[in-house]
Image (cartoon, rainbow, N blue to C red):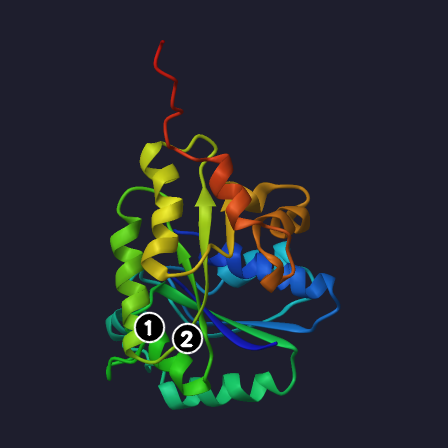
């Protein structure tokens, strides 16, 4: 299955739950899975981070965190703020490439969006994906503003020659407004591909997360999600009525 990097259109769009869903489905099929978070920011050493959530939702995964910084900043800025040694692209890429030999699937969850800086030389998740020859799964927000963020991210990947592994809406609201429902078809238009999945808001709190993951991701990731059926179910087009005769 190889290496897949997971990025978002911004922060708090569902990257971690999407990563956990992919990992849980792979584990359910007997695959060995490693999840890497190159840098966790905004937490002290004793606080549970994103990887703790992945471990809870996808039992059996092995996780690796290479650096942690207490300030809620980009990894590069957080390291600079505390005076810590910054992460180096070559070292991170070498470690991830080595893990690829030991696991069926290696998932690399970024920090924030695609072009967030990890080091003083400006390297980003896009550079890391290129270095390890990994496609990038893009997790998008559902609501207003997501189309521009998604289009820009997809364009940045394309310009760097990094393949787009798929597109997932990471947190679908229980009561989507008109913009959110219209965005489904438009997200597919701006990326040129159908959605790979839609995960509901509150998914981490479901008692049967594996079932949620299976319903929320398509068969490329081991699930049953059908983009066309979902699009039809939330179609915002007003129903037409026949004119009176």
Q: Residue at x 65, y 67 (%)?
A: 61
Up the image or down, 216 lies above or below 156; here it is: above
Nearest the viewer among 86 and 19 is 19
SS at mark 2 in the image: loop
The one of 228 and 39 positioned closer to us in this rendering: 228
SS at circle 1? helix
The residue where tag 1 is placed is 157
Q: Residue 231, how many percent across, how many down?
A: 47, 42
Give the quadrant of residue 87. bottom left
Q: Quadrant of the N terminus?
A: bottom right
Circle 2 packing at 10 Å, graded few (<14), some (14-19), many (20+), is: some
Label 2, on which residue? 163
The image shows residue 66, relative to residue 152, as above or below, that is: below
| Residue 9 visible in the snapshot | no
Residue visible at 56% across and 47% down in the picture: 204
Identified at 43% across, 60% down, the residue is: 193
Given residues 102 and 78, the one toward you in this image is: 102
Q: Quadrant of the C terminus?
A: top left
Q: Compared with residue 160, is residue 141 higher up or lower down, i.e. above or below?
A: above
Cα separation, mark 2 vs mark 1, equals 7 Å
Quick one: label 1, few (<14), some, or many (20+) residues within 10 Å?
many
Q: Residue furthest front?
A: 245
Measuring from the top left, give residue 34's x and y in whole percent: 60, 73
The answer to whether residue 196 shows anywhere in this view is: yes
Residue 53 at x, y = what percent? 55, 56
Give the residue displayed 35% in from the left and 44% down from the top.
Answer: 183
Q: Quadrant of residue 27?
A: bottom right
Would you place residue 202 above or below residue 88 in this image?
A: above
Earlier residue among tags 2 and 1:
1
Are the residues at dot 2 and dot 1 in contact (C-beta closer than 8 Å)?
yes
């Amino acid at each position: 299955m190889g290496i897949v990097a997971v990025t978002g259109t911004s922060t708090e769009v569902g990257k971690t739950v999407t990563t956990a869903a992919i990992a849980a489905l792979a584990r359910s099929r007997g695959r060995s899975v490693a999840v890497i978070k190159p840098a966790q920011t905004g937490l002290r050493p004793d606080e549970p981070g994103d990887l703790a959530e992945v471990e809870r939702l996808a039992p059996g995964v092995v996780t690796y965190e290479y650096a942690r910084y207490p300030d809620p900043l980009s990894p590069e800025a957080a390291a600079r703020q505390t005076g810590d040694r910054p992460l180096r692209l070559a070292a991170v890429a070498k470690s991830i490439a080595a893990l690829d030999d030991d696991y069926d699937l290696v998932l690399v969850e970024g920090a924030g969006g695609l072009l967030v800086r990890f080091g003083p030389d400006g390297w980003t998740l896009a550079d890391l994906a290129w270095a390890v020859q990994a496609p990038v799964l893009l997790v998008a927000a559902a609501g207003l503003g997501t189309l521009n963020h998604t289009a820009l991210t997809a364009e940045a990947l394309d310009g760097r020659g990094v393949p787009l592994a798929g597109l997932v809406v990471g947190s679908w609201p229980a009561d989507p407004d008109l913009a959110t429902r219209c965005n489904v078809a438009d997200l597919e238009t701006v990326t040129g591909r159908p959605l790979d999945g839609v995960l509901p808001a509150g998914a981490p709190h479901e008692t049967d997360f594996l079932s949620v993951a299976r319903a929320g991701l398509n068969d490329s990731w081991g699930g049953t999600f059908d983009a066309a059926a979902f699009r039809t179910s939330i179609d915002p087009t007003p129903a037409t009525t026949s004119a009176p005769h």
